[in-house]
Image: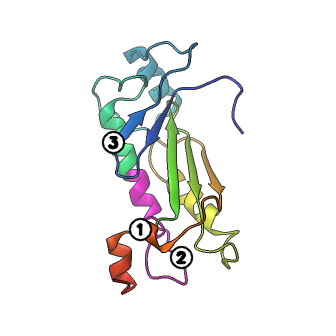
Amino acid sequence: MMDDKPTQRDMLNLDGAAKPLPPTSDMAAATSTDTDAAAERHPKALDLGGAPASGSALSSEEIEQMTADIVAAIKTVYDPEIPADIYELGLIYTIDMDDERNVDVVMTLTAPGCPVAGEMPIWVENAVASVPGVGRVHVELTFDPPWEMSRMSDEARLALNMF
């Protein structure tokens, strides 16, 4: 799944902002050459210009746009039994993207016995993989911490009439 070699990663906060993690000891500072090399490896990636974000080969603009696109893609996935998308339901715990635009998603379900438990992570993987510029996508399902209704957005509460 992951290389033993450490890679620089940008944690994508669910509000769309990027928060770089501290670089590992053997990582060099990102340069425009690193960004060019990444674009060559991923020709479908958007070239949004700008200087690389601190500790990343990707520009702040590219991280921001890809984050918005990934969240928008995830918002197309609905729990078939609940009329709200899984992002607004609070089922997405983390979205993590590395310099090669590989994306790891950690998500949960409303209950371990959910009838689509085997399918929903595949739906999320397919949705994220459809975003231009995204490399490999890995979705991990977890129940720690368990989902609770307090994770829902106001939008989901309104859709479910749970105010």
Any mark on residue 137, and which?
A: none
Residue 68 left/right relative to 122: left
**Tag 1, which secondary structure?**
loop
**Tag 2, which secondary structure?**
loop
Q: CA distance from mark 2 to mark 1?
A: 11 Å
Q: Is residue 44 visible?
A: no
Going from the N terminus, do you reach mark 2 or mark 3 first?
Answer: 3
Q: How is the image coloured?
A: rainbow
Image quadrant in which you'd find residue 157 = bottom left
Residue ID for mark 3: 64
Task: Write down the region rendered in magenta.
Answer: 69-89
Residue ID for mark 2: 79
Q: Residues within 10 Å of mark 3 (few under 14, many from 20)?
A: some
Is residue 73 on the magenta stretch? yes
Q: Is residue 136 visible?
A: yes
Q: Which residue is drawn at the image coordinates 51% and 43% (left, top)? A: 96
Three-letter amino acid code of the residue under disc 2: Asp
Q: Residue furthest bottom?
A: 161
Where residue 135 appears, as percent x and y from the top left, is 55, 41
Image quadrant in which you'd find residue 142 = bottom right
Going from the N terminus, do you reach mark 1 or mark 3 first?
Answer: 3
Is residue 88 on the magenta stretch? yes
Residue ID for mark 1: 88
